[in-house]
Image: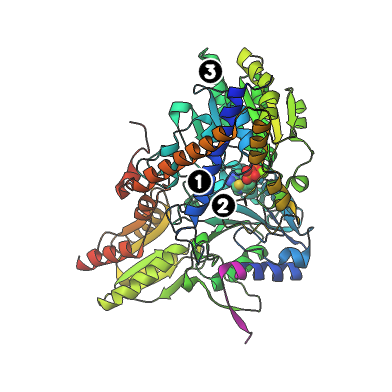
Amino acid sequence: MLPTNEQRRWMYRNMLISRYMEERIETIYMEGKKPIFNMANGPIPGEMHLSNGQEPCAVGVCCHLGAEDIVTATHRPHHIAVAKGVDIKKMMAEIFGKKTGLSGGRGGHMHLFDKDVNFACSGIIAQGMGPAVGSALSRKLQQKSGIAIAYIGEGAANQGAFHETLNLASVWKLPVIFIIEDNDWGISVAKSTSTSVAKNSDRAAAYGMPGIFIKDNCPDQIFSATAAAIEQARRGDGPTLIEIKTSRLAGHFMGDAEDYRPKGEKENLLMNDPIPTYRQALLDENVITLEEDSALVQETQQLIEDAITFARDSDEPAPEEALEHVFAH
Amino acid sequence: MSATNKLTIARAMAESLAQEMRADPNVFIMGEDIAQLGGVFGNTRGLYAEFGGERVRDTPISETAFIGAGVGAAMDGMRPVVELMFVDFFGVCFDAIYNLMAKNIYFSGGHSNVPMVIMASTGGGYSDGGQHSQCLYATFAHLPGMKVVAPSNAYDAKGLLTAAIRDNSPVIYLFHKGLQGMGWLGTEPAAINQVPEENYQLEIGKAKTVISGTDITIVSIGMGVHHALKAAHELQKADISIEVIDLCSLVPLDREHIIASVNKTGKLIVVDEDYHSYGMSGEIFASVIEHDHTIFKTPPQRITYPDIPIPFSRPMEQWALPSTEKIINACLTMKEK
Ligand SMILES: Cc1ncc(C[n+]2csc(CCOP(=O)(O)OP(=O)(O)O)c2C)c(N)n1
Ligand SMILES: [Mg+2]
């Protein structure tokens, strides 16, 4: 199944939003952190895991989803949150730790929760998978529509939770899809030195479910290759494991010197940045015109600038608000 | 006297590991990003270059597997040092820790040893959110069969790690990120001190009186010791004499040392960055009262982390953390009583 032109424009637009968000966060994150890089300082403190380069994985899958579908993401969640339709202003405010943020500043960039579009994430490797399986079970038991998608990195496929949840989802034939974003690295450890198989999608066989490997970091290919799996889940015919070869264009987190990368790797990845490549394809195939493209660039940049202004202008939470929402009320 | 160098905790830990690895071929290290990268927190820097990938092993992100593997290797005569990058990640591998590592000596009736060390980073204060900022001291200390230590400075860091590696029982070695001397996690100058080049051990289970005083006893561990020292310094100006005790170990807990001090001052404050309830502060109060229920001249106080998940946002997190200011205020009200 090929994406329509409208879907292609949607994917391109969301990749732009995500990338501008990351580029602006990258700059703002460094405010207050020079000349001495101390994570505690600046308007955005703490760890920061940017998703530059992985946008196709987000849009290619989420293009098939609606707000009712459930997505769990990881410590690197921004691109997926954008594609899932998480409120950009509230998300930015959360990343800034403001009162107007998605969680009033309690979560931060690794813990973005937006109930309106069924989005959540966890900073513990592979721990989004159990909740995704459980949400899928809930939809099945309640006979409600909607499926669950659990995103993980390739490093997470060596975690116990990965193997347990795949088995459970398969045994119970749940409407859930597991998406592995294979960017080759778990911090400084290469996939080839940590993983017993070249393709994690091969591991699907051990759990009696289809495994799909997508070798190109391209929104159209990801869209097409995931369509059938998502249809299968929606039909009630069980889960699929999908691994997408993607690229982490930034360090593991901000401040990472990336000395572990082989010479030339980063340059090579940057040369194959999926966004300019996709833009060119859309232009070449007359899906967008140059004028439309520059309008889109302007519009999406403005969207991010507005979100940043909103976040900066928002109040900080009062310290005592830390005590709220430990339990439900 | 052997030469000394001014070291960070990270470098002191790496020095202890290198010396123990040179001395004993059965010592080896495994964990995530501990080989070429030298550990996210710098404590294994240089070891891969010296000892190679057989003895300095990067692992997959498979804590249950490699911590369980540590137990098996330790029972078979090796001395594994295993890193759990953030203590917060214990959730994915706790069975290997508390049901295997901590119990196998006992289950074997003392026939097996488990000479294994788990190094894990602790602590918040730099807005890393609720899954990367915890201390969890009491979680480990509560469960029998593991020793638990936490250094507050480089000298102690080296001596405690060496003792932990040589110990035939499992030891949880908790280092605070804010004391690590990594710069990007802030710097606490007092944690960087003179460390003898020659290897040495600090006895696990022995507390230290860092400064002596007569009015109030403050007991803490790790980062809290530094808050207490700063408070003591300030309070000197108000003519309040503070005694600061650095526990160094939570298990075994040096109860006698604490009791001796409170016998003198009659006033006790416990500072703990771990959660408030069911923790170190409660255990220390109980231990003192069990010894002598008339010992306190004023109700003891505890400055701890409230019973809430750790919020990301700076104003909320900083408000919740123990601080020098909170200790000073507690001392001032206590002194008046
Ligand atoms: C259980 C657990 N172990 C270790 C970590 C520390 N950690 C955070 S990200 C990361 C690497 C993850 O690699 P991958 O799953 O490939 O995701 P990527 O960072 O490449 O997006 C590690 C080891 C963690 N958060 N949780
Ligand atoms: Mg990865």
Could you tell me which residue is drawn at 59 percent across and 30 percent down? A11
Instruction: Indicate the chain on which mark 3 is placed.
Output: A
Residue A218 falls in image quadrant: top right
Q: Can I make out residue B99 in this image?
A: no
Q: Earlier in the sequence, mark 2 or mark 1?
A: 2
Please say if B326 is above or below B63.
Answer: below
Cβ of mark 1 under 8 Å from ligand 1: the answer is: yes
- Give how far across and how far down residue A323 sits, in percent: 33, 44
Instruction: Indicate the chain on which mark 1 is placed.
Output: B
Same chain, labels 2 and 1: yes
Location of mark 1 (residue): B131
Q: In the image, which is nearer the foreground, mark 3 or mark 2?
A: 3
Could you tell me which residue is drawn at 50 percent across and 71 percent down? B191
Location of mark 3 (residue): A139
Count of numbered tags: 3
Looking at the rendering, the stretch of residues picked out in magenta corresponds to B1-12
Q: Which three-letter amino acid code belongs to the residue tagged 1? A: Gln
- Secondary structure of the residue carrying numbered label 1: loop
Mark 1, Cα crowd under 10 Å, few <14 / some 14-19 / many 20+, is many
> Is B262 within the magenta?
no
Please say if B74 is above or below B212.
Answer: above
Cβ of mark 2 under 8 Å from ligand 1: the answer is: yes
- Give how far across and how far down residue B246 sits, in percent: 45, 68
Mark 2, Cα crowd under 10 Å, few <14 / some 14-19 / many 20+, is many
- Position of B306 compared to A300: left or right? left
Mark 3, Cα crowd under 10 Å, few <14 / some 14-19 / many 20+, is some
